[in-house]
Structure formats: C-alpha cells, structure tokens
Amino acid sequence: MRVRANQSILLTLLLFTAVLAGCTTDDDGGGGESPIDLVIYYDSTSGMIQENIQNGAQVSFSGVELSFDYAYTKSTAGDIESFYFEAGDGSSRIIVDANETGEITYTYATHGLFTANLGAIDEAGNEDNTTITIRIDKKTLLGESGTTNPPTMNIDSTPDCECPAPNKIEIDSTVENPPNFQGIGGSPVSVTWILSGEGIERNSGQEQIADGQDAQWMHSELNPGAQIWTLDVELNQENEQVNVEHEVTITYSGQESNPNPMPIESD
C-alpha cells in the first residue's frame, strides 16, 4: 500500500510539473523571433572633434565621421526595405533605401557618450535593431597673438546627450613674451592662469616671463561635471604684448562599444 501511495504522489508531481512547463513555454513563445538577421559592421566607435580658434575666429573644425555597413543584413520574410541610424545626439533618424545603399555615414559634431540605435525594416514591416555606445571627445586649440588682455576661454563640459559627464578636462597652455624689435625696451611680464568652475578655482600661481621667453601651465581637472568652466590668463601689466596658445581636451571614460569590423576572408 505504501509503494502504491508513493507512486500516486510521484505521478501527481509529474503531472503538476508538466502543467507548469506548458505555461512557461506559452509565455516564452508568445513574442517569437524577428525574421531579420541584423548584421552591421563598423570599424570604430570613438573619435575626437578638433576645433581651432585663432584671434577670435574659428579657422577649422572637424567632426568625427563614423560609417556603418548594413549590407549583410537579411530577412526570411522578404527583402530588406530600409536601414536606419539614430545618433543619440538629438538629431533625426537617418533612413536609407536598402535597394540603393547598404551603408550609413554620420558625422558627430558634439562631444558625449552617445547611445546610437541601428536597425532594419523588411518589406513585410518586420523590424530589428540594436544599440551601441559611441564615445566622442573634443580638443580645442585657441590662440591669441599680440594681446595685452587675453580673452576668457569658455570650456563647456556638458555632454550633448543624456549620459555621464566627461571624466577629465586636460589643459596645456603656453604664454609667450615675444622679444621686442631689436631687443630694445622689452620687459618681463608676470602671468597667472585661473581655471574656474561652480564653486571651484584652480590657480597656477604667478610666474614671471622674461622678454623673449615663454611659460607653460598643464593641468588635469578630474570629474569636471556638466558645466561651463572658464580659463583666464591674467597679466601684471598692459605694456607688454603676449601670445597665448591653449590646448584644451575634454575626454570621457572608455565605455564605448567594441568595433565590429568586417571579417577578413582567409585564402
């Protein structure tokens, strides 16, 4: 009797487990998989914007151009109709006709850690997409020549996305006291660099520059937050003209997605 009772209990447990398994299968299989096999190749997911400003005028600017190859994307439900790319910087979705091209190229003009959305749509209306993280840093060169009152440089560390702020601002600045004509009448000048943020001030201390010489200040501001910093160069006199060269780099932590280059076919 005890053996038969145990067998009955075991049979009941097996039936109950089967019912639960059936419920799990129904829940998991309801959504189904996309018929689209989304294959996208890209050689890079990061870069640095370069801006050059001389005597108050922008003389050059280069964004970061990234390309994405969708050509190997297929669908079992029909032909691919379109590919799209959303940069994550507030710009509109880029859509291309899959019959015309399998590549999308986009140029980032602002810095940040962007979440880009890449996808494809087939002729049956099926859609598949994926997201990647793109890191865009920025370097600004600012020069001012023959000045007795160097202008303030604004450094905007606010990213152009809903993402973490930069992890560092790097400053490499040089002030030159150029020699006077034939070395006559030249005098030293004292200079102080001041970097200011919200409730923060970094002071280089005063440094004297002899006629025909220069001085350099290098500084790294970690975790600068999202704000506008100012970089000032203060001189102790207005009788000597100086040349100022700032190189300021805004960088983010290396959280970008790994590149996905097209595989190289072996012979």
Image: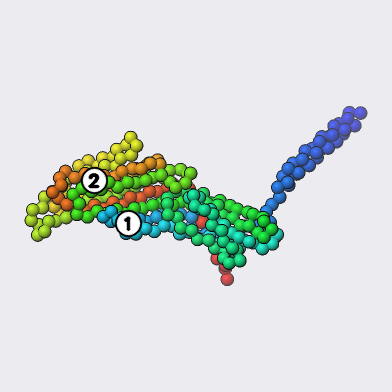
**Which numbered disc, 2 or 1, marks the residue that appears first in the sequence?**
1
Would you place residue 197 above or below residue 214 in this image?
above
The x, y position of residue 27, in whole percent, is 73, 43
Q: Give the residue at x 61% y 66%.
A: 99
Q: Is residue 76 above or below residue 219?
A: below
- Which amino acid lies under the numbered mark 1 shown in the image of this protein? Gln
Q: Residue at x 11, y 59 (%)?
A: 181
Residue at the spot of label 1: 58
Q: Secondary structure at mark 1?
A: strand
Separation (CA) of disc 2 from disc 1: 20 Å
Q: Quadrant of residue 58?
A: bottom left
Q: Is residue 261 visible?
A: no
Q: How is the image coloured?
A: rainbow
Q: Where in the figure is residue 153, as x and y percent of width and height?
A: 30, 47
Q: Is residue 180 left or right of residue 40?
A: left
Quadrant of the rendered image containing residue 76: bottom right
Q: Residue at x 52, y 51 (%)?
A: 116
Q: Which residue is mark 2?
A: 233
